[in-house]
Amino acid sequence: MIPSFYKHWRHVFKLDPDREIDDASLDRICMSGTDAILVGGSSGVTYENTVDLLARIRRYEVDCAFELSDPACGVPGFDGYFVPMVLNTPLREWMIGHHVNALKDFGHLLPWESVVGQAYLVLNPDSTVARVTEAETDIDSDTALAYSHVADRLLNVPVLYIEYSGTFGDMELVRKIRGGLRQAHLFYGGGIDDPDKARLAAQTADTVVVGNVVYRDLEAALATVSAVKN
Ligand SMILES: CC(C)=CCC/C(C)=C/CC/C(C)=C/CC/C(C)=C/CC/C(C)=C/CC/C(C)=C/CC/C(C)=C/COP(=O)(O)OP(=O)(O)O
Ligand SMILES: O=P(O)(O)OC[C@@H](O)CO
Ligand SMILES: [Mg+2]
């Protein structure tokens, strides 16, 4: 059975173990009415800073999942685990290579009932994830759609993640992609920093991910919750 713990999530905050958040702010995030906290980052994530953040989030009842970007950070105790694979990278390791190595080493330890593969389509060239994976972000909408069909219809991925980390994306494209999906659940993340953007994203994606604004403007971040959920 493919895990389904994330399927009712409409709004998610993504918290980065490599960034500071004080207790009062974390309290407001966890009590905000969001559906889940997704722990993850594209650099500087360690076993130690992940354990630390998880322990602090666990004071609350909110769902908490981990998006792995390093096999050495397999911290137990999350409600679920996402393993990203980047569709539009020319570097085999970010699509499948690290994953094969990690499964050779840790496959027997994995809590498979709560592990979900995520196919990332990375579309902001200035994001860390685009730089790290050398993602081919300069693609037209037909190519982006074709990627989404490969992920959804040929690979049958459970989650397709349209990633504009750092900038608000092309909602028309996201809408087209969503309309063409047969079975994948669509995550959208990138540049959501006010209720209007959150609402637009919520109209196009199944799950809306709000990240960096948490660290820049907490009030603006909190305002995205009701915009998505109402
Ligand atoms: C015992 C136990 C509980 C174990 C569970 C462990 C487990 C499930 C292990 C899985 C094993 C496995 C197959 C691991 C693969 C690991 C691996 C290296 C995969 C590659 C992942 C990958 C493609 C990483 C590239 C970067 C990426 C897509 C990161 C995702 C998160 C992301 C985009 C965050 C945004 O980053 P941010 O830092 O916020 O970026 P900005 O600077 O733009 O803000
Ligand atoms: O940080 P932002 O731009 O909100 O993006 C959220 C998330 O998609 C990052 O992986
Ligand atoms: Mg970030």
Image (spheres, rainbow, N blue to C red):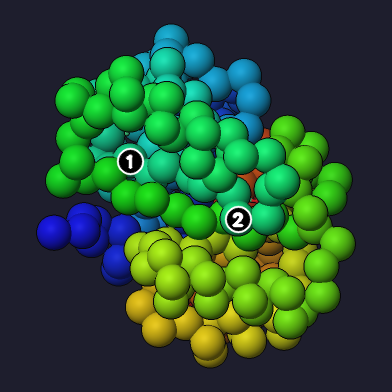
Q: Earlier in the sequence, mark 2 or mark 1?
A: 1
Question: Can you give x and y, in whole percent of width and height, for residue 117 in the image?
Answer: 38, 50
- For the residues labelled 2 and 1, say whether their Cβ atoms are less than 8 Å apart: no
Residue type at mark 1? Tyr
Residue at label 2? 87
Return the x and y of residue 67 as percentages of the image width and height. 44, 39
Q: Nearer the viewer, mark 2 or mark 1?
A: 2
Q: Which mark is residue 182?
A: none
Which residue is at a point 61% across and 40% down the rendered structure image? 92
Disc 2 from disc 1: Cα separation: 19 Å
Q: Residue under circle 1? A: 81
Q: Closest to the observer: 29 or 78? A: 78
113 above or below 17? below
**Count of picture labels:** 2
In the rendered image, the residue lying farthest to the top is: 48
Quarter holding the N terminus is bottom left
Mark 2 residue element = loop
Nearest the camera: 208 or 225? Answer: 208
Q: Is residue 56 above or below residue 60?
A: above
Can you tell me whether the CB of the residue at mark 1 lies under 8 Å from the nearest atom of ligand 1?
yes
- At 54% from the left and 21% from the top, the residue drawn is 45
Residue 222: image location, x then y, percent: 56, 54
Q: Residues within 10 Å of mark 2 (few under 14, many from 20)?
A: many
Left or right placement of residue 75 versus residue 39 in this view: left
Residue kind at label 2, given as amino acid type? Leu
- Which residue sits at x=16%, y=46%? 113
Q: Quadrant of residue 57?
A: top left
In the image, is 37 to the left or to the right of 228?
Answer: left
